[in-house]
Image (cartoon, grey):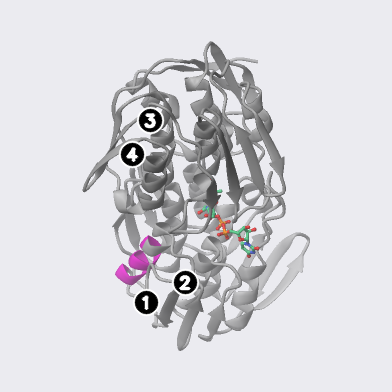
Amino acid sequence: MDKIFIDGGKQLAGSVDISGAKNAVLPIMASALIANGKSVISRVPKLRDTYTMIRLMEIIGAKCSFKDDILTVDGTSVNNPEAPYDLVKTMRASFYVLGPLIARFGYVKVSLPGGCAWGPRPVDLHLKALEKLGAKITLKSGYIIAKADKLIGKTIDLDFPSVGATGNILMAAVTAEGTTIINNAAREPEIDQVCKYLISMGANIKGSGSSKIIIHGVEKLHSANVEIIPDRIEAGTFLAAGAILGKITLNKLNPKHLVSVINNLQEIGCEIETTQDSITISPADIIKPFDLKAEVYPGFPTDLQAQWMAIMILAKGSSKVTDMVYYDRFSHIPELNRFGANIRLNKNTAYIDGVKILKGAPVMSTDIRASASLIIAGLAAEGVTEVSRIYHIDRGYEKIENKFKLLGAEIWRENKL
Ligand code: EPZ
């Protein structure tokens, strides 16, 4: 089993390039299923999740070829609207095939995504919305079966601006009869890119990136090419390391997607310089404590909550971290405390008393972003850290140790029992 080892306490310096965004490429790959013909998707990150989605697309019948960071998807031969449990259980985002396949076939069978480390994570908003568009939905042996002769556009008021539900509604509604309005839609940049991609395939969508999206159904879509936006969560992860460990520059990103993150980093004492497509961060001399609330976009992303905690454990004073999106996304706390951090949890708020130093320790990853926080803590800790179950981190980061090595870290991967 591969593990990542870190000999910590080294200053970071230099620059790295940011990859394409995982949370944009997955729904965009699903969107390509709506149309016949070849779509060329560029700047595709080589992640475990990307390969899982390719496997799913091939099971559904699409032809995929992936070379360097270019993925070609041919949706012409798509003929099997089913997403099996074995794949969906490894990646919730597989549920993104629900919208495209019911739009294309009027029928789809998708395994219900199981729970995850942070609780139930239901898909009720996805299903309620599709029912509103006229789909008949049944649950059979853990599979959702959705049928509709023709989807009819309707107004959908989302109880919560769910990223996944907004994505599935968009992909289902683009060829529905009439107009669909999504109120309280997700505004994440990844969903904005899905809208823009669907428009490039011939869809008629207004309000992309806002909380009210209007979709006028069209007859059919055609294939189209797209370059994936930069991964703001990967960028935020490196910024968190820079906030503690050294002046670094991140290139090939969009600072506009990171406004809340940049503001908070400046609040705790970091210096930030931005250009159109890069951010340079200089660490705080003394990290100031800060009470954070993780929220939906444009608020501070929940996917950076754990990495932010890895900074706050070294702050001079006490701070709080509250997650307003996932009530119990805190499986990283007991692992961070193994480094000598001082974190207590009460409901969806963590209470952190900053410490002066961290000591390297063997720790275990529990999910993608939790493992990123352990790597940051390991880079800051004195001595050696051993991170296990790193298949989690490979789901969301392209060989993360190579990029940290470029910044001067002593970090390596080893196949060890
Ligand atoms: C997307 O997940 C991201 N995944 C997640 O990133 C991210 O944490 C999340 O959005 C929030 O920003 C991808 O884009 C592939 P949601 P998604 O639907 O779509 C509740 C990472 O680390 N909810 O916006 O699953 C839900 O339980 C991953 O890259 C319902 O109650 O998130 C949660 O509390 C982790 N019913 C909240 O809404 C529903 O039908 C947000 O979920 C749907 C969601």
Frontmost of labels 3 and 2 is 3
**Residue 191 or 377: which is nearer the viewer?**
377
Distance, label 2 to label 1, CA atoms, is 9 Å
Q: Is residue 199 magenta?
A: yes
Label 3 sits on residue? 284
x and y percent of residue 364 in the render? 64, 27
Frontmost of labels 2 and 4 is 4
| Residue at image point 52% right, 46% down | 303
Q: Earlier in the sequence, mark 2 or mark 1?
A: 2
Residue that extends furthest to the top in the rendered view of this protein: 383
Label 2 sits on residue? 170
The image's mark for residue 205 is: 1
Q: Are marks 2 and 1 in contact (CB under 8 Å)?
A: yes
Vertical arrangement, residue 331 with respect to residue 9, above or below: below
Q: Earlier in the sequence, mark 4 or mark 1?
A: 4
| Residue at image point 30% right, 39% down | 272
Hey, what amino acid is under mark 1?
Ile
Q: Identify the image quadrant of residue 1.
A: top right
